[in-house]
Image (spheres, rainbow, N blue to C red):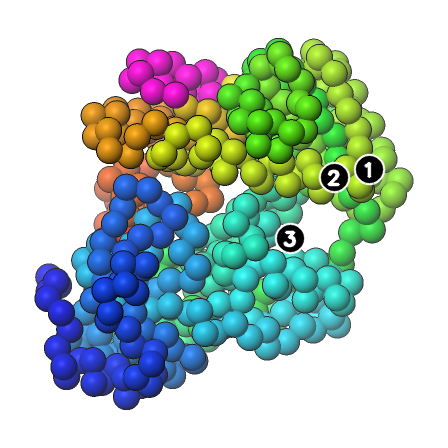
Amino acid sequence: MFSDESLSTDVLRKLRSVVGDEHVRTDPGVLEAYARDATPLFRAYPQAIVEPDDAPQIAEIVRIAAEHRLPVIPRGSGTNLCAATSAQQGGIVLTTARMRRIEEIAPAELLARVQPGVTTAALAKAAGEHGLFYPPDPGSHTVSTIGGNIATCAGGLRGLKYGVTRNYVLGLTAVLGTGEIVATGGRLWKDVAGYDLTRLLTGSEGTLGIITEATVALLPAPETTGTGLAYFTDLEAAGRAVTEIIARGVLPATLEFLDRRCMDAVDAYAHLGLHATAGAMLLFGDDGGDDQVAASLTRMRQACLDSGALSVEIGGVAEAEPLLAARRCTLPALSRLGSLTILEDASVPRPRLAEMVARIDDIARRHDIVIATFGHAGDGNLHPTCVLPSAEDTEAIERAERAFGEIFRTAIALGGTITGEHGVGAAKLPYLAERLGPEQTALLRRIKSAFDPAGVLNPGKLGS
């Protein structure tokens, strides 16, 4: 459908007339930098990198692309882990790196308006200066952008208590595949006029529209936070503790798990002195008023002890951030163990978390690879991570890919899904029809056609 030849002089001239000569790049070094995102094993070269500054520029770029049948791949910081911004069919990578303005923080309305290139951490910092709080908290929050978070409906460590990105998107301005600019939703926390196009665009991975501005909800910042750490003989016992915590009416702000392999890697990386022989650990925490946090931590500590915890430690504000930082460093810690790290994500119903981890361990043994597993215990979201000693070992890579295929199908069989927060992208597209079934898959394609009749927006992903 699309050509992999260099862009014509006419197309380049048109693009440069829109954004300026310096913001259309075709030199090999720049194309190499945009040939992949954070997803290993996926590399595809675009034909040009274009850096617009506003919605009208993006609309004109999309019209040019539709006229010349050129793919347009929207990209923020490229931190996604599903090859969602990989130019699998060539074309134009449209980066929102120049669109970094926080347009407004409105404390009276508990909202913010931001351009898509604003990082998650920058928005959180700006909100904090007004005593407010932006809850979505992906692991890459220091560099990931709001536009990318919305495009993949990013989750994070606070997902159980606060929800994920879609729960905070009030309104969007986006450019459709026709070049039309649409504004969905707005500044209202309640608005049920028409189909919820804001929710539809959220998580659409740039296949339905290119986000140019977002209005997001904020919350009053919690007074304090508290964190605890519980060690267990195995993940089954940790899973029982998770069930018991929820059963006792506690909704933690943080409820994370690491298996033994992850604990060893994190301790070698961060030198935290984690339990030397425990088979699994839970990191739990809450936020809010002082009394509420103290009560929640006490109840979670007792639930862990009653579920067979080997030991439980409670920390205050000073201890919370280092422990959360340690959880965030799990991926880089594991990455030190080999030259190729493949991080995936799948979700199952919370009561089946331990069973899923056991199945992952069995799959890893049968395929003769090492998989460490960590994730969000509170919502059943797992991150099985395979570390291979060599990125050149094609036979080991094939075994890992077969293993992950089994993992995704196992998640589906247990009533779960192939991705809880990373997205589908090109990496999981082969498993999407198994998850959705033929009727939903066909519906996705019809929706895609309505938003993007020429099929130029991020082809090869989702409904393409």
Tag nearer the camera, 2 or 3: 2
> Which residue is denoted by mark 3 in the rendering?
135
Residue 93 place in picture, x, y as percent: 30, 66
Q: Which one is nearer the viewer's eye here, 402 or 393?
A: 393
Q: Are marks 2 and 1 in contact (CB under 8 Å)?
A: yes
Residue 418 place in picture, x, y as percent: 37, 36
Residue 83 place in picture, x, y as percent: 32, 49
Determine whether, in the image, residue 135 is placed left or right of residue 367: right
Q: Quadrant of the N terminus?
A: bottom left
Is residue 364 in sight in this rendering?
Answer: yes
Task: Find residue 217 and name its label.
Answer: none
Determine whether, in the image, residue 296 is placed left or right of residue 175: right
Q: Amino acid at mark 3?
A: Pro
> Which residue is denoted by mark 2 in the rendering?
320
Q: Amino acid at mark 1?
A: Gly
Quarter-of-image position of residue 101: bottom right
Q: Quadrant of the C terminus?
A: bottom left
Kind of element beneath mark 2: helix
Dot 2 alpha-carbon crowd within 10 angstroms: few under 14, some 14 to 19, many 20 or more? many
Numbered range of the magenta stretch: 355-370
Q: Which one is nearer the viewer's eye here, 161 or 263?
A: 263
Kind of element beneath mark 3: loop
> Which residue is denoted by mark 1 in the rendering?
316
Number of dots carrying numbers = 3
Quarter-of-image position of residue 313: top right
